[in-house]
């Protein structure tokens, strides 16, 4: 059995399988060509006082999805962020059900913005309303407020990609954050990204990865690198996570 986690963070040549993994393998161009064949639609999910706007891309030809990935945007963005550079479609072309939502107070979602303590339960309610199990999350910047408190249990989340996440100073007991985590930030990001890397380096199952030629919104500045890192991480988790 291959074990992804380790008991203590190692900066020497050892470390966990995840730490040592090369996640940079490029996505094959023929896979990208399938982007135009994926099924894409937009809908609404009624969740309490919110009418949540949802974008969804599914694998071509109604093929079985490897897993469901939910994309959460940053504070000054909306779910449309994840349609730029065909990003949602690329993940669907590679076999993932890709869902992006407008968070409360943003985009086309109707209903008030949420106070921070209510954000994690909103995300859990969304996941449960869709009947999803073992989802993967990609969370940018301030949307980490929805995700970080849920990372102490692998019952719902199988893995998380945190992109220059906010609020990492609230992680006071790193060993309890058991969900496998990939932390990404752009090399030109001098604030949230490096701070997050420093605060999250001692999570039990974590890989820290800087993205070249990119700033804070590294998924927009270097999308091919971002996509490759995420997809290789997801495939690793699917293949080896016990």
Image (cartoon, grey):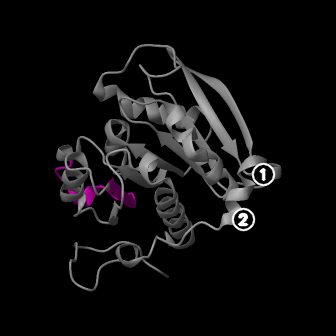
Q: Which residue reaches farthest right?
A: 61
Residue 211 shows in the view? yes
Q: Is residue 239 above or below residue 140?
A: below
Mark nearest the camera among 1 and 2 is: 2
Distance (Cα) linking label 1 and label 2: 13 Å
Instruction: Residue 229: give x, y in percent of width and height.
Output: 47, 63
Q: Is residue 68 left or right of residue 224?
A: right
In this picture, which residue range is highlighted in magenta?
A: 171-185
Count of all numbered marks drawn on residues in the image: 2
Q: Residue at x 37, y 50 (%)?
A: 162
Q: Earlier in the sequence, mark 1 or mark 2?
A: 2
Q: Is residue 32 left or right of residue 80?
A: right
Q: Secondary structure at mark 2?
A: helix
Instruction: Residue 4: give x, y in percent of width and height.
Output: 41, 73
Residue picked out by circle 2: 30
Q: Which residue reaches farthest front?
A: 213
Residue 156 shows in the view? no
Quarter of the view holding residue 55: top right
**Marks 1 and 2: CB-CB under 8 Å?**
no
Dot 2 crowding, Cα within 10 Å, few <14, some 14–19, many 20+:
few
Dot 1 crowding, Cα within 10 Å, few <14, some 14–19, many 20+:
many
Name the foreground residue: 153 vs 220: 220
Q: Is residue 154 above or below residue 88?
A: below
Q: Residue at x 69, y 62 (%)?
A: 31
Residue picked out by circle 1: 60
Q: Residue at x 53, y 43 (%)?
A: 70
Instruction: Residue 12: give x, y in percent of width and height.
Output: 21, 83
Q: Is residue 177 magenta?
A: yes
């Amino acid at each position: 059995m291959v074990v992804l986690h380790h008991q203590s963070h190692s900066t020497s040549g050892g470390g966990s399988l995840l730490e040592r993994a090369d996640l940079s393998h490029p996505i094959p161009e023929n896979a990208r060509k399938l982007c135009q064949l994926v099924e894409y639609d937009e809908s609404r999910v009624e969740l309490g006082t919110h009418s949540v706007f949802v974008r969804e891309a599914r694998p071509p030809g109604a093929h079985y999805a490897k897993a469901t990935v939910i994309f959460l945007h940053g504070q000054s963005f909306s779910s449309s962020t994840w349609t730029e550079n065909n990003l949602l479609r690329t993940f669907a072309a590679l076999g993932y059900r890709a869902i992006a939502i407008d968070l409360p107070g943003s985009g086309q979602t109707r209903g008030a913005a949420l106070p921070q303590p209510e954000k994690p339960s909103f995300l859990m309610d969304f996941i449960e309303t869709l009947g999803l199990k073992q989802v993967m999350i990609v969370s940018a910047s301030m949307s980490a407020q929805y995700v970080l408190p849920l990372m102490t249990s692998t019952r719902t989340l199988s893995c998380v990609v945190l992109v220059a996440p906010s609020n990492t100073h609230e992680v006071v007991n790193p060993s309890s954050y058991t969900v496998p985590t990939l932390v990404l930030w752009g090399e030109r990001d001098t604030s949230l990204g490096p701070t997050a890397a420093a605060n999250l380096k001692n999570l039990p199952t974590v890989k820290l990865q800087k993205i070249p030629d990119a700033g804070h919104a590294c998924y927009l500045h270097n999308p091919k690198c971002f996509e490759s890192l995420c997809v290789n991480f997801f495939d690793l988790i699917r293949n080896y996570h016990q």
